[in-house]
Amino acid sequence: MPQLNLHHLRLFRAVAHAGTLTGAARRLNLSASALSAQLKTLEAALGHDLFERRGRGLVLTEAGQIALDHADAIFRTADDLAATLRHFEPGRRVLRVGALATLSRNFQLRFLRPILGRLDVEVVLRSGSQAELLSALEALALDVVLTNLPPARGAESRYLVHRLADQPVSLIGRPARIGQAVPLGELLGREPLILPTPETALRNGFEVLAARLGVAPRIVAEVDDMAMMRLLVRDDAGLAVIPPIVVADELAAGTLIEAHRLPGIEETFLAVTLERRFPNPLARQLCEAAA
């Protein structure tokens, strides 16, 4: 077999992902005829047709799908190498961290604390939705994603999910609202509550607890952002069902107090990395330290 031309393989990959010859040619700034000729050269080298035409589009043959899987792996490894060597310059390293926008800021700070202030390390911190962050992780734009939502993992998943901490969840509020030694069931039935949104694991755990206690809670707010829950409970909108780590400063100052630790309810914090040939050692060190 003739030696494989990686330039031809890159062009093939662009066409496979575009689905049309003209679309790929436009992105590559090539003529469709020139791109077609180079694809034919690659097919001759491999000894198989890679596409079949259907209407105005191109569909991968079985050999084409195999070739695309290998091409994706080859160029993903090349991108990984380039990103690694670019960010690991002598004397200085970069750690790119993505954090779920609704995740506790205190938890993020605790995770990063071992490397904050180091002159040889630069931290790039980005927030976003789970889908946005995992896409950036796949594209090697992030080294680690901090979340409390386990990512979906199929047979082909390359995610490595590190369980960092299981934080307790408590009923927290202003001292004047909580009073002295009031039973949990009484507080839940008497005071307005700031709760996580219904699709969260925390909310499900709370609903189970309330049913067990025979309480019909009076909900004043449903919030998916821990920072907003923190602001609401600080402003005395009600009692919050929240991990104490989120309001650690207020608890230390005494502006908020922990009325009750909620039995059987925990918030799990995760770090998600990707199986990589050149993983960022800073991400591994932080995951090990946090766990």
Image: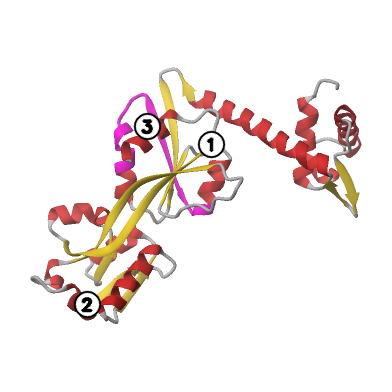
Amino acid carrying mark 2 in the image: Glu
Work out which quarter of the rendered image holds the C terminus and state it.
top left
Kindly tell me whether residue 115 is visible in this rendering. Answer: yes
On whether residue 57 falls in the magenta region, the answer is: no
**Up-down: is 198 above or below 82?**
below
Residue 72, given in percent of the width and then of the height, sits at 69, 37
The residue that disc 2 covers is 191
Identify whether 171 is placed above or below 47: below
User: What numbered label is drawn on residue 215?
Assistant: none
Q: At label 3, which amino acid type do we have? A: Gln
Residue receiving disc 3: 285
Q: Which residues are magenta?
A: 110-131
In the image, residue 202 lies at what x, y percent? 35, 64
Specify few, some or many for label 2: CA neighbours under 10 Å numbering under 14, 14-19, or 20 or more: some
Say if residue 25 shows up in the picture: no
Q: Which mark is residue 275?
A: 1
